[in-house]
Image (spheres, rainbow, N blue to C red):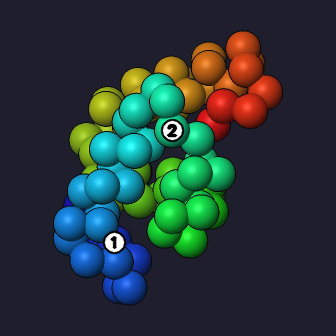
Amino acid sequence: MTQAPRHLADHHISDIVQMALSDHVSFAAIEAEYGLREKEVKALMRAQLKPSSYRTWRKRVRAFGDRRAQYK
């Protein structure tokens, strides 16, 4: 696994991963709370998840995004 952003504590990284995995939290909400843009959240998720888990998460996020404009 690669390095997480240096300004984030381990418990914050865990919180961000949980938020990103949730179907009810948008990238905008994560940015408002932690200051990470969508691209940075995706990079963090790629670093923290197994490759297959990351691909599954991205597929789900894209599917939701196609159905709801304000979702991830």
Q: Tell me the quadrant of the picture where the C terminus can be found.
A: top right
Residue 15 visible, this orientation: yes
**Which residue is drawn at the image coordinates 34% and 72% (left, top)?**
4
- Residue extending farthest bottom: 7
Cα separation, mark 2 vs mark 1, equals: 20 Å
Give the number of the mark in front: 2 or 1: 2
Residue 2 visible, this orientation: no
At numbered mark 2, what does the secondary structure look like: helix, strand or loop?
loop
Q: Which residue is mark 1?
A: 4
Asked whether disc 2 touches disc 1, contact meaning CB atoms under 8 Å apart, the reply is no
Q: Is residue 28 left or right of residue 34?
A: right
Instruction: Answer with the quarter of the image where residue 61 lies.
Output: top right
Q: Is residue 5 left or right of residue 2?
A: right
Q: Is residue 2 left or right of residue 33?
A: left
Q: Amino acid at mark 1?
A: Ala
At numbered mark 1, what does the secondary structure look like: helix, strand or loop?
loop
Across and down, in percent, residue 64 comes to 62, 20
Across and down, in percent, residue 20 comes to 43, 43
Across and down, in percent, residue 28 comes to 64, 51
- Counting the numbered discs, the total is 2
**Which residue is drawn at the image coordinates 74% and 33% (left, top)?**
70
Pick whichever, 1 or 71, lies toward us.
71
Pick whichever, 47 or 41, lies toward us.
41
Using a 10 Å C-alpha cutoff, classify the residue at mark 1 as few (fewer than 14 neighbours), some (14 to 19) or many (20 or more).
some
**Which residue is drawn at the image coordinates 30% and 63% (left, top)?**
13
From the viewer's perspective, is residue 11 above or below residue 72? Answer: below
From the viewer's perspective, is residue 55 above or below residue 31? Answer: above
Q: Amino acid at mark 2?
A: Val
Q: Which residue is mark 2?
A: 25
Mark before the other along the chain sequence, 2 or 1: 1
Instruction: Answer with the quarter of the image where residue 26 lies.
Output: top right
